[in-house]
Amino acid sequence: MYKKRMAGVKVPHRKNTAAMAPERIPLPEQVVIPMSMHIGAPAKPLVNVGDEVKVGQIIAEEGGFVSAPIHASVAGKVTKIDTVLTSSGRYMPAITVKTSPEQPVDENIKPIQVTNKEDFLKAVNDSGVVGLGGAGFPTRVKLTVKTKVDYVLVNGAECEPYITSDTRTMLDKADLVMEGIEFLKRYLQPQNVVIGIEDNKPDCIELYKKRCSKLTDVDCVALPSLYPQGGEKVLIHNITGRVVPAGKLPIDVGCVVINCTTLAAIANYVKTGMPLIEKTVTVDGSAVANPKNVIAPIGTLMKDVFEYCGGFKEEPGKVLYGGPMMGIAVPDLEQPIMKNTNAIIALNKKDGKVPEPTNCIHCGRCTAVCPLHITPFAIERAFKTEDDEALVKLEVMNCMECGCCSFSCPAKRPLVQVNKLAKMRVKAYQTRLEAEKKAAAEAAGNGEVKQ
C-alpha cells in the first residue's frame, strides 16, 4: 500500500448498528419507484397504469448508454405513472405500484449463464445494478473498459458516520462478494485486486484477510479510519499512489473501483436471476427510536421504514439520504428508498441545526484537510466577487464535495455548499465561452465569404 496518503478528517464513527444483521421489513402498501436512480438518462417505462406486475419484472428500460433498467420490487398493480418531487428539488418520473397480497415472481427469473465477457456485461446491465455505495453510476458502463486494467479496487471503506450497510454485506454475503471478484478477475483480467477496508471494521478485515490468504492475486488491506477514505480518488491514491487528474476517470490511471455491495448484487443476479429489487439500509441518527439495518423493497417510502424502526423518539430536525457528511436532506418522509440508498439518518433538532457562520479567520484549516489540495476560503471569496476566471484557476471543478472543509472550519463557513455553487457557475461560464468562441468563428467565416 502506498505510504503517503491524502489528507482528510477524523469524524466520529457512530457505527451503532455494525453488529445488527439486517431485518426484512413487512411488505409496504405501495412502492414509488423513480425512473432516475442512477447517473445518466432516466429509464423509460414499459408498463401502463392498470397493469399487473410481478416481483423482478422489468418495468423500465435504460434510456441511453449511460442508464440502467428498473424492475418491480413488489408484485401488484400499477396505479400511477407521474412525476414526483425529489430531494434534489427536481421532478422525475416515477411508477407507483400498489402491492398485492400474493407476491408472484416473474417467470423469467432464472440463473444466468455467463461464459464470456459479453455475457458478463449483459448480465450486469440486465441486473439493473448501479454503484451502490451512493454514487449510482451504471455499473455496466463502468465495467465496459477497453484499456488495460492494472488494479481492481473493492471499496469496503464505508467512511461516513452511522452507515453500516456495506459492513453487513461484507459480513453476511462474503461468498457473493468473492464470487463478484472472481467475475472481475476473469473478464477484466486486472494485474491486481485489492479489497480496501477501514481499520474500524476489524471483523471484516479479519474475514477477508483469511479469504485472501488462500488466493495469490487478491489482497485485503486495512486503511486508516480517515474520512473520506471511501472516495474513489482517495482510495486509488491511498492504495496505489496514483492520482486521477481533474476531469478524468479511474480507468484513465488503470484502475476500476467497485463497491463491495455492488459486487454482491452482481453475483446474486448471476446466481439466481433476481435483479436489484431491494436494498439493505442503515436507519440511525439521534432522533430514531430503534436504530437498525433493514432490508426494504426499492421504492419503499421513508415513513414506512422509520415506522418499522419504532418511529422517532424526538422530533427530527433533519432527515438525510446517506450520512451526515455527504448526505442530502429530504423535504418530507414521502421520499422512496432508491437503488443507491445505503442509509437514512434522522437527526434531532440540536444535531440537525445548521450553525451560524462567523467571519473567516484565515486559519487555512480548510485547505490543510482537503484531500485534493484546493483552497476553499479563496474559492468562497472568488465566488462572492463573481470572478469566474479565478474560480477556474483555483480548480474548484476538482472538488469532490466531501465536506471536509466545512467540517473543519472553526468559523462554520458553508464552504462545501459554496464549492457546489461555484462549480455550477464555472460550468455556465465555460458554456458561455464556448458559445462566444463559436459565434466569433462563424462571424469571421461570414466576413471571409463577403470579401
Image (cartoon, grey):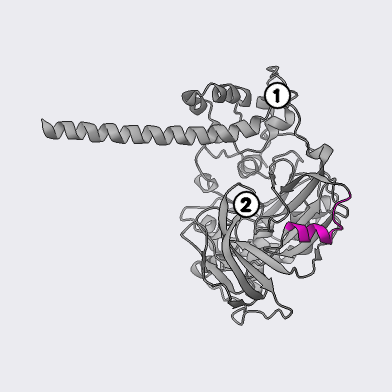
Q: Is residue 425 above or below residue 288?
A: above
What is the C-alpha distance between the residues marked 2 and 1?
34 Å
Instruction: Give residue 111's position: percent from left, percent from top.
Output: 62, 77
Q: Is residue 212 above or below residue 408?
A: below
Query: Which region of the structure is painted magenta?
Result: 302-313
Quarter placement of the N terminus: top right
> What residue sits right under mark 2 in the picture?
86
> Which residue is at the front of the view, 189 or 45?
45
Q: Tell me if residue 209 can be seen.
A: no
> What residue sits right under mark 1 in the picture?
365
Amino acid on which the number 1 mark rests in the picture:
Arg
Q: Residues within 10 Å of mark 2 (few under 14, many from 20)?
A: some
Question: Mark 1: which secondary structure?
Answer: helix
Quarter placement of the C terminus: top left
Q: Which image quarter: residue 174?
A: bottom right
Q: Is residue 347 above or below residue 357?
A: below
